[in-house]
Image (cartoon, rainbow, N blue to C red):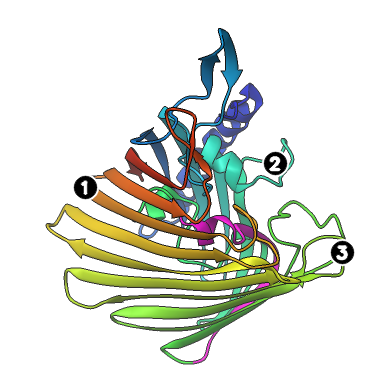
Amino acid sequence: MKAITTSKLVKILFLLPFAFTTSILFSQEEEETSKFSISGSVDAYFRTNFNGLNKSEEIIGGDPVDLTPAAPATSFANDPGFAIGMANVILGYEGDKVGFVADLVIGPRGEDAVFLSSPSANIVNQLYAYYKVNDGLKFTLGNWNTFLGYEVISPAGNFNYSTSYMFSYGPFSHTGFKVDFSLNDNWTGMLAVMNPTDYTEYNPIGKYTFGGQLGYSNAVGSAFLNLIYGEQSLTDDALFQLDLTTGWDLTDTFYLGLNSTYQSTDGVGFYGAALYPQLALSENFGLGLRAEYFKELEDGGPVYGADVRSLDFTLTGSYTLGGLIIKPEFRLDSISEEVFLDRDLATTDNLASFILAAIYAF
């Protein structure tokens, strides 16, 4: 688990008084409607494997040996026992024409999300300003979380607490310039020019990535077709990713989401699809399933290796009590290769695990 340094705590503590002071000033100027906002979340969890190794040290032959606890090779929430996620504070201002977002994170989940940032800036998850020309046209400059995929970095924005393979190996964030526009009441579009994926502070290689989105929404759901294309390193091979994200309220209590994606860099990459059915059983409790198929390409993949197939079935309960969300979660990963260690330190191709997460959103 990564350490949280004192300097990061100082940064957060320094910025929070500024945020609250600014909030008071805006409240004084506009008593009826405050344009300044503070939101965010904190999360922690307990995780254990039913059939996999649950510790990082073991006595073998009388000597301590460092091991890797069994966990899916997906982002976040993979540490054994009781563990922490992140604290997330989002400062925002929304004027009639202009606004900004400063999204700050601290903790292991936040550090993993901004993994290419230097230590001095790895508390910044998003940082951008925008200008609305009118209701149908907006310009944004800065760093924002990716528009690809169904899942997001903040645990408060996902039904499942653990994350999918498709989310984990797609982009997390982009820094650049984008134009959002509306075609009519239902259709929207977006065009962007950005640094290589996840280089959020600056562009170290002088190459750029292009992004686009076409969206449709109505009263019961939405669908977005997303695209990125560009060289992500000093090689001449460009990454191409095409992604479809959609979700619909089929009844008052049943929702169905779908994410499918294809990513390739000169034949190395992956494709996959996931269904996200969710059922509201009461005003405060619901059940949701993620059923994911993930396949790495024959020439290579970013997770377990070339031509490896992964299946992820995750069943999550979600109980809401005010701002507190409790999520018990059962997950089964099945891989076409033996990639996990069981409790006897033998390799196996499947892993069954349980998470109990607590999220407070404000």
Q: Residues within 10 Å of mark 3 (few under 14, many from 20)?
A: few
Residue drawn 33% across and 78% down? 221
Task: Name the secondary structure under disc 2.
Answer: loop
Q: Nearer the viewer, residue 18 or 150?
A: 150
Nearest to N terminus: mark 3 or mark 1: 3
**Could you give the CA–CA distance between mark 3 and mark 1, rounded to whole angstroms?**
48 Å
Residue projecting furthest to the left: 282
State which quarter of the image contains the C terminus: top left
Question: Which residue is denoted by mark 2 in the rendering?
Answer: 121
Question: Which residue is denoted by mark 1 in the rendering?
Answer: 319
Q: Is residue 115 magenta?
A: no
Q: Which residues are magenta?
A: 164-183
Q: Nearer the viewer, mark 3 or mark 1?
A: 3
Estimate the x, y position of residue 107 in percent, counting from the top left. Answer: 53, 34
Q: Nearer the viewer, mark 3 or mark 2?
A: 3
Q: Amino acid at mark 3?
A: Thr
**Could you give the CA–CA distance between mark 1 and mark 2, rounded to whole angstroms?**
34 Å
**Could you give the CA–CA distance between mark 3 and mark 2, rounded to whole angstroms?**
27 Å
**In this image, 289 relative to 12: left or right?**
left
Checking the image for residue 235, the label placed there is: 3
Residues at circles 3 and 2 in contact by the CB criterion of under 8 Å = no
Residue drawn 62% across and 32% down? 11
Q: Amino acid at mark 2?
A: Ala
**In this image, 268 relative to 257: left or right?**
right
Residues at circles 1 and 2 in contact by the CB criterion of under 8 Å = no
Residue drawn 47% across and 40% down? 71
Residue projecting furthest to the top: 62
State which quarter of the image contains the N terminus: top right
